[in-house]
Amino acid sequence: MKKILALAAACTAICMLFAGCGNSSTSNSESTINTEATTTQQTEATGTTESVESTEVPAANDDETQGIDYMALVNKLNALPDYWEKTVETVHCTNSLGDDVEVEKKAYDAYLALKSDLEAEGVFVDLDSARRSIADQERIMKDFTEKYGADYAAKIVATPGFSEHHTGLALDLYLNIDGEDVYLNEDMVQYPEIWAKIHEKLADYGFILRYLEDKEHITGYGYEPWHLRYIDDVDKAREITEKGITLEEYLGAVKSSDVNVDYGSSDIFTEEELKEAAVQVKCKFATFEGCELHSLRYAGDESNSEENLARMKEFDDTADYVEVIEFLTDFHTPEDGSQVFDADSEMTDYQWWLAREKDGGWQLISWGK
């Protein structure tokens, strides 16, 4: 929970870049723990104690008797299987921040092996969060809605039932550097060389890096170097990693396509600012089921006009937007059609409008022809 509260208090730009597209990392400190066995492990890196508590779940019928599917796809379009919460076997541990973290049992064993390997090379990590139940996610959504409003909560918090963290197989790490815990997103991204060392070892323990850079239009989330996914198959993990593809692509849930991104030139915005806005567009596009993105381009500085600012404020009269950005996309619709688009059609110059307040991050306001 520390990371979510800290991020909410931080500037909106950081939230929109790292959390707005995805899943703000939250420790499951409020969940109910059914303890049957407890062991204690000493972490040499920090000198902290991890208390590990195993939660046994009785077997059920049909899918439940087969155990969980470690390759299950849970994202913005695919919900957690109904049987999952009755079937998944988890353990609880306490991280160096004092937070309780619940993890699927095999994923936790693999994490400990990875952690030990990393420590042998002087890289120290800990678990920020892993499993959150649907009830936990509903509680987080309710809290954010009450504190920040429904629109903001919808952008920051994953829809209950559609978060990969429900599986217990998604692990968010944080770093320990020179004896200090580094757990805020904006701080952790300052150490790309450390994350590179971590990523090199993931596949050897059955993990993949879940949210890749430049794949936001497929995963629906911005790049998160700390977010791992356990798939319980070293060979598959190595194949996915070597090919540089997402779980969606590996499972054939989406068509792989090269996206031509053109930021053009701007006298108003830096390329980094344009990239931050483009990530928001691509994250939303991931919810266009069956659609294949071909190109995304900056529409030009002329879109940042008083007239367009006034239009953006019509969507939220409490907002004090000071800048507006427009992007255009070309994409192909699915052959079997959708509720929104004609079947098997090429959409061109599809508009996306974003705005931001002073010192704030980009907010996706509207999209369409």
Image: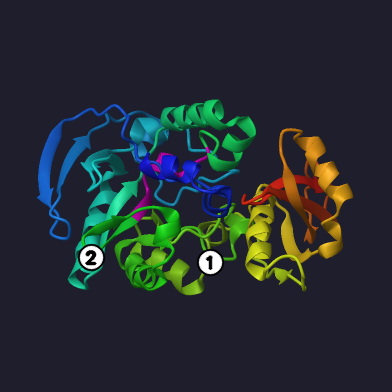
Q: Nearer the viewer, residue 308 or 94?
A: 308
Rendered view: 329 above or below 23:
below
The label on residue 178 is 2
Rendered view: 61 above or below 186:
above
x 71%, y 38%: residue: 319
Q: How far apart in space, not on screen, are marks 2 and 1 (Cα)?
A: 33 Å
x 40%, y 64%: residue: 237
Residue denoted by label 1: 245
Residue 47 % position (x, y): 12, 54
Coloration mode: rainbow
Rendered view: 65 above or below 12:
above
x 27%, y 40%: residue: 99
Name the kind of residue labelled 2 in the image. Asp
Write down the region rendered in magenta: 162-173
Q: Quadrant of residue 93 in the image?
A: top left
Residue 174: in sight, yes or no? yes
Callout count? 2
Dividing the image into 4 quarters, which one contains the N terminus?
top left
Q: Are marks 2 and 1 in contact (CB under 8 Å)?
A: no
Residue 241 % position (x, y): 44, 69
The answer to whether residue 216 is magenta is no
